[in-house]
C-alpha cells in the first residue's frame, strides 16, 4: 500500500472527524425540477434530539403550485401539485443545527431486551428487511453470539461482519433489501444498512434506518445509516458503509460504529412505509429522494440537488 494510504489518509480522516466533532449549523437549499403534470412529494427534516430546525422551512415553486405538508409515521414531506405540463422548479430552504453523536456505555446483555417493551416495527421483518432468511441465520450463527453476550459486543461484532462481507458500489435511488445485500454483496449505503438492521433484529436488537444526506461538503449526496436501541432506551448510531469506505481509504467522510459526525442531516427514520397518498395506497421503501406516484407505483426523481453552507 502506498505512503498516501498508510500515512496521509489516516491523518486526513482524523482531521475531518475532528472538524465534524462539534455542533454545526447549515443553511440548506434543496432544488427539485420536474417536467410534467403530477404531485411531487419531497421529504424534509424534522427536529430531533440531535438536530434542530432553527428557521421556518420555506418552499417556493416556479410557476407557483398548491402545496401541503403530510405526515407519514412522524416523518414529514411536502406535496406539490403541478397542475400544468410545463417544467417546474421547486426550492426548499431552511437552517438546521446538527450535533455529532457518540456511543453510550452500557453493561447490558442481549437477554436484557426481554425485560422491556419494544415497538414491533423495530423488530419485525419488512419487505426490505428479511430477518427469516436461511442465509442470514447462517451468517449470524458463525459469529458465536449468545443471549449473555453484552449488547455492545454483539452489535459491534455484527457491524464488523457486515463490513467484511459487503463492498460499496452500484448506488441506486431506492433501497436495497437485506436479501439483495446478502446475495449480491456489492451494494450502496442502503444495502449495508438493511443487512445490518436485519442482523440486529434477528438477535432481538431494535434497529431502524436513518435516511438523509451529507452536509458540509462540495457534493451533498443522499446517504443512509442506522440506529439501534439499547435496553435503556438510548439510540446508538452506526454507519457501516462509511466505516468500510474509511478503512479502505476510499472516503474521508465521518461515520463508524457508535459515532457519526455533524456532517449529515437526517430526513426520516425507519423504512417500508405503507400510506395513502392522493387516494392511492402505497408502499414506500424509504423517505429520502423526491418522488411522484405513477400507476400506484413510487417513481423517484433524479433531477434534484442539495447545497449546504455553514452558518
Image (spheres, helix red, strand yellow):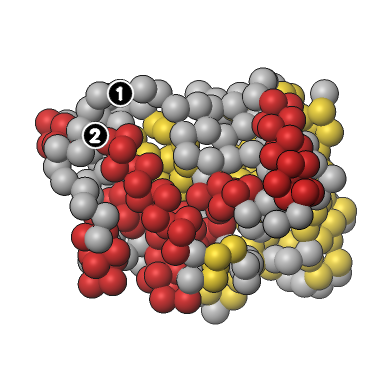
Q: Residue at x 63, y 48 (%)?
A: 246
Q: CA distance from mark 1 to mark 2?
A: 8 Å
In this picture, residue 41 sits left or right of residue 30: left
For the question of whether residue 143 can be seen, the reply is yes
Q: Name the spot of residue 298 as percent of width and height, x first.
A: 55, 69
Please tell me whether residue 84 is drawn above or below residue 113 in the rendered image: below
Instruction: Pick whichever, 276 or 285, lies toward us.
Output: 285
Label 2 residue SS = loop
Disc number placed over residue 284 in the picture, else none = none
Neighbour tally class for label 1: few under 14, some 14-19, many 20 plus, Cα within 10 Å: few
Q: Name the spot of residue 304 as percent of width and height, x first.
A: 77, 58
Q: Residue at x 84, y 56 (%)?
A: 89
Q: Which residue is mark 2?
A: 150
Whether the residues at callouts 1 and 2 have beta carbons within 8 Å, the answer is yes
Label 1 residue SS = loop
Q: Check the picture and name the quadrant holding the N terminus.
A: bottom right
In the figure, residue 149 lies in which quadrant?
top left
Instruction: Pick whichever, 166 or 117, lies toward us.
Output: 166
Q: Residue at x 52, y 45 (%)?
A: 239
Amino acid at each position: 500500500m502506498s505512503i498516501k494510504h498508510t500515512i496521509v489518509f489516516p491523518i486526513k480522516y482524523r482531521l475531518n472527524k475532528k472538524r465534524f466533532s462539534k455542533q454545526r449549523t447549515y443553511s440548506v437549499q434543496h432544488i427539485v425540477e420536474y417536467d410534467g403534470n403530477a404531485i411531487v412529494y419531497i421529504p424534509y427534516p424534522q427536529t430531533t434530539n440531535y438536530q434542530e430546525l432553527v428557521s421556518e422551512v420555506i418552499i417556493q415553486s416556479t410557476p407557483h403550485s398548491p402545496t401541503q405538508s403530510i405526515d407519514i409515521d412522524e416523518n414529514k414531506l411536502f406535496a406539490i401539485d403541478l397542475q400544468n405540463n410545463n417544467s417546474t422548479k421547486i426550492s426548499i430552504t431552511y437552517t438546521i443545527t446538527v450535533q455529532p453523536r457518540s456511543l453510550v456505555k452500557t453493561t447490558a446483555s442481549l437477554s436484557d431486551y426481554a425485560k422491556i417493551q419494544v415497538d414491533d416495527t423495530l423488530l419485525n421483518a419488512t419487505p426490505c428487511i428479511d430477518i427469516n432468511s436461511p442465509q442470514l441465520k447462517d451468517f449470524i450463527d458463525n459469529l458465536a453470539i449468545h443471549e449473555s453476550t453484552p449488547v455492545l459486543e454483539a452489535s459491534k461484532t455484527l457491524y464488523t461482519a457486515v463490513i467484511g462481507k459487503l463492498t460499496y458500489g452500484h448506488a441506486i435511488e431506492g433501497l436495497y433489501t437485506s436479501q439483495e445485500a446478502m446475495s449480491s454483496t456489492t451494494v450502496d449505503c442502503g444495502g449495508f444498512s438493511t443487512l445490518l438492521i436485519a442482523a440486529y433484529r434477528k438477535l432481538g436488537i431494535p434497529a431502524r434506518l436513518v435516511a438523509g444526506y451529507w452536509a458540509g461538503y462540495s457534493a451533498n449526496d443522499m446517504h443512509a445509516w442506522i440506529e439501534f436501541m439499547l435496553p435503556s432506551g438510548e439510540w446508538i448510531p452506526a454507519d457501516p458503509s462509511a466505516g468500510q469506505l474509511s478503512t479502505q481509504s476510499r472516503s474521508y467522510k465521518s461515520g463508524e460504529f457508535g459515532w457519526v459526525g455533524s456532517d449529515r442531516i437526517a430526513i426520516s427514520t425507519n423504512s417500508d412505509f405503507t400510506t395513502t397518498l392522493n387516494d392511492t395506497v402505497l408502499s414506500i421503501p424509504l423517505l429520502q429522494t423526491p418522488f411522484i406516484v405513477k400507476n400506484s407505483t413510487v417513481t423517484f426523481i433524479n433531477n434534484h440537488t442539495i447545497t449546504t453552507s455553514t452558518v
